[in-house]
Amino acid sequence: MGFFSEFKKFAMRGNVIDMAVGIVLGANFTNIVNALVEKVFTPITAYFTGNTDVSGFSIHLPPVIGAQKQAEIGLGAVGQSIIQFLIVAIVMFLLVRAINRLNLDLGSAPVPEDVRLLREIRDLMKQQNSA
């Protein structure tokens, strides 16, 4: 089997194509989440906290003899990351929840004939065994 025919067989598998579609949609979904976070939720948190960025907050440690620069603990950067994570997590939860509700409203798919028949056979066998 040649290289190109083997590659074509690999690339045309359903899993690879599904993964590619998922990656493209995921990248675009990221844009939606970022826009919601930056333009909707961050201004709301800034309204209540008075600032959108707390990453500059740090605790300065006492200077060490002979050190060029004073050491500091960057609590603000950690806090900012936690705040951003929580906002993104809440937005993702709300979006996935809305999408799941849209899927539920579409109704259930009809049960295939073979599955329906198998269920009937199962139920009849249960009745016979219980009698």
Image (cartoon, helix red, strand yellow):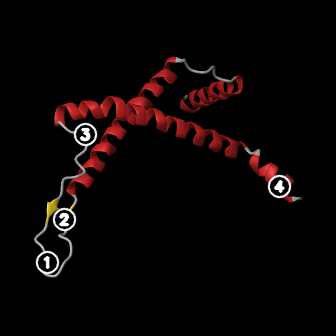
Q: Residues within 10 Å of mark 3 (few under 14, many from 20)?
A: some
- Real-space Cα distance between discs 3 and 2? 22 Å
- According to the image, label 1 marks what residue? 64
Residue extending farthest left: 62
**Residue 130: horizontal and vertical position, in percent?**
54, 31
Q: Earlier in the sequence, mark 1 or mark 2?
A: 1
- Report the residue at 18% width, 53% height from top: 57
- Report the residue at 63% width, 19% height from top: 110
The kind of secondary structure element at disc 4 is: helix
Label at residue 72? 2
The amino acid at mark 1 is Val
**CB of mark 1 within 8 Å of CB of mark 2?**
no
- Real-space Cα distance between discs 1 and 2? 12 Å
- According to the image, label 4 marks what residue? 6
- Real-space Cα distance between discs 4 and 2? 56 Å
**CB of mark 4 within 8 Å of CB of mark 2?**
no
Q: Earlier in the sequence, mark 3 or mark 1?
A: 3
Q: Earlier in the sequence, mark 3 or mark 2?
A: 3
Where on the picture, by quarter, is residue 109? Answer: top right
- According to the image, label 3 marks what residue? 52
**Residue 12: horizontal and vertical position, in percent?**
77, 44
Label 4 or label 3, whichever lies nearer to me, is: 3
- Report the residue at 10% width, 71% height from top: 62
Label 4 or label 2, whichever lies nearer to me, is: 2
